[in-house]
Image (spheres, helix red, strand yellow):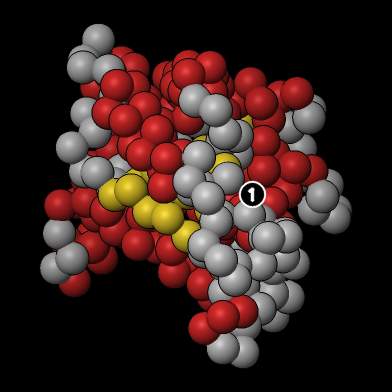
Amino acid sequence: MAEKVKGEEMAEKVIGVLGGMGPEATLDCFDKIIKNTPAEKDQDHLRVLVDCNPKVPDRTAAICENGESPVPIMLDGARSLTQAGADFIIIPCVSAHFYLDELRRQIDIPILSIFDVVTEAIDKVNPPIQVVGLLATTGTVQGGLFQKRLEQNKIATIVPGKSDQDKVMAGIYKIKATQVRDRREKARMELLEVANSLIKKGAQGIIAGCTEVPLAMGPEDLQVPFFDPLLILTRAAIREAGRKPRVRP
């Protein structure tokens, strides 16, 4: 691992962001680290290393259709971050966490789990949430690891039926494809329609289980708690780096 630059605060850890899945979600990740770090000047912020490689193969295609594995390119990025001086890694892509155990076995620094930190955040909500709805890629839904982690804390998960899941994927790919306002608004409406359907089926909260989802909708759109995994993950990363995240309004 690279030595820390002279003058850096040794008590603080360097965050590595294994990104590019997708690029705008990676940008949102870095933005959330900055906005959730208490700082009065540049030097108060944490050191963050970002590897943004959008050439990582599609995670849903790999999980569901025996497509090209994303692991080799992800490992290259993780090793680059390690060599550059990262003390631990976060991945701003939920579907990529399907491969978390495989990645952890082959690199020398920790990777925070988005499944763990989101489950722990939901577990702290009062009154308790026993059932959540999951808006995620088909890879995440069919992979089932998010649901299994939630179940360990006795939190049940409702996922969309096939037609609604198709709407979720269409919405996600609209967000990935363009920033044209009318297409993103259409994506928002598709995602909201499915979220409200899950609420009608008993979901007491909604997990934005793909990091593109919060780019189109937020807590103000729903009548139940909205869990943004990337916000939760970045705040956990700030704590892991040795700082207390800003108090949220």
In this view, 222 is above or below 51: below
Which residue is the extreme one toward the right? 127
Residue visible at 66% across and 26% down in the picture? 149
Which residue is the extreme one toward the top? 66
Which residue is the extreme one toward the front? 6
Q: Which residue is mark 1?
A: 205
Which residue is the extreme one toward the bottom? 40
| Residue 18 in sight here | yes
SS for callout 1: loop
Q: Is residue 14 left or right of residue 96?
A: right
**In the image, residue 41 lies at what x, y percent?**
56, 88
**In the image, residue 100 lies at what x, y percent?**
50, 25
In this view, 89 is above or below 96: below
**Image quarter of residue 248:** bottom right
Residue visible at 52% across and 62% down in the picture? 5
- Which amino acid does the dot numbered 1 rest on? Gly
Task: Please state, as top left, top right, bottom left or bottom right, where the C terminus lies in the image.
Answer: bottom right
Give the class, few, some or many, for how many residues have Cα within 10 Å of label 1's Cα (few <14, many ≥20).
many
Foreground pick, 12 / 185: 12
Foreground pick, 185 / 36: 36
Residue visible at 29% across and 58% down in the picture? 24
Residue visible at 31% across and 43% down in the picture? 21
**In the image, residue 123 lies at what x, y percent?**
79, 43
Foreground pick, 94 / 193: 94
**Image quarter of residue 7:** bottom right
Q: Is residue 219 left or right of residue 236?
A: left
Number of marks drawn: 1
| Residue 193 in sight here | no
